[in-house]
Amino acid sequence: AIGGWMDTRSNSGTRIKQGCQPRVVRIRIFGDDPRQIHRIGKLSGNNNSCSLGCFELGFVFQIGQKTNFTLTSGKKATYYIDLRKLSLDHRAAPLIGQVMLDVLAQIPDVDAVGGLTMGADPVASAVLHQGAARGLKYDAFVVRKEPKDHGRGRQVEGPDVTGKRVVVLEDTSTTGGSPLKAIEALEREGAIVVGVAVVVDRAAPAQARIEEAGYPYFAAINLDDLGLQPQ
């Protein structure tokens, strides 16, 4: 089997602004079959070996106790999880796709995946490509924040979702606003939304809001995996 594990540690050599310290996540890959990535998760024990190689990416940025980060929801936080550092990296994107395929395996008869641009876009693309490598037939779609004001005036781009069973993806969600907005647009197009799946669950109101709206909620990674506390 092949697997990717995350281990978090501070790296004082990189800054994105004064006082902001990225936490580096070391992703370890082992095994001999790139089609059998098990999951990205918390590093187990003291096993530091990786037979296929290791790489490190800083995607959790922290500013001590100051509330300097403003999230999409408008809430403040002392850390910011920038998953685009992973989902748009040529090494990590395939792992994201494989991890989300494991999540999607819990939901029967899914036809297509996608979400509100732009956090969901690279995640959906990773799922599409890694799914195809496994012989799975997941289409992808993009939900614009507003309908186009020209051309066909579409809000949902990609293959027709009318009557299709779809899962709304998101990289990470705090209040659930982005997935719920995507759901509204998809249902106007006649899609059957069968769940919401996020890469990282921030242990915030998103899950409760989405489930209260009647949609199952799934997450691949939680804050414990990243050594973070809910905010």
Image: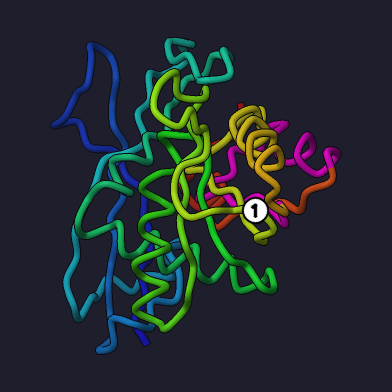
Q: Secondary structure at mark 1?
A: loop
10 horizontally vs 173: left or right: left
Q: Is residue 16 magenta?
A: no
What crowding class fits label 1: few (fewer than 14 Cα within 10 Å), some (14-19), or many (20 or more)? Answer: some
Counting from the top left corner in percent of width and height, residue 109 is at 66, 73
Residue for point 66% across, 32% down: 176
121 horizontally vs 228: left or right: left
Q: How many marks?
A: 1
- Report the front residue among 148 and 140: 148
Q: Residue furthest left?
A: 13
Q: Is residue 207 magenta?
A: yes
19 versus 171 height, above or below:
above
- Report the front residue among 11 and 85: 85
**Which residue lies under the disc numbered 1?**
162
Counting from the top left corner in percent of width and height, residue 219 is at 60, 54
The magenta-colored residue range is 193-213
Color encoding of the figure: rainbow
Counting from the top left corner in percent of width and height, residue 24 is at 28, 43
Dividing the image into 4 quarters, which one contains the C terminus?
top right
- Report the front residue among 184 and 152: 152
Residue for point 64% across, 42% down: 186
214 versus 117 height, above or below:
below
Residue for point 42% across, 73% down: 131
20 versus 60 height, above or below:
above
Counting from the top left corner in percent of width and height, residue 108 is at 69, 73
Where residue 178 sits, quadrant-wise, is top right
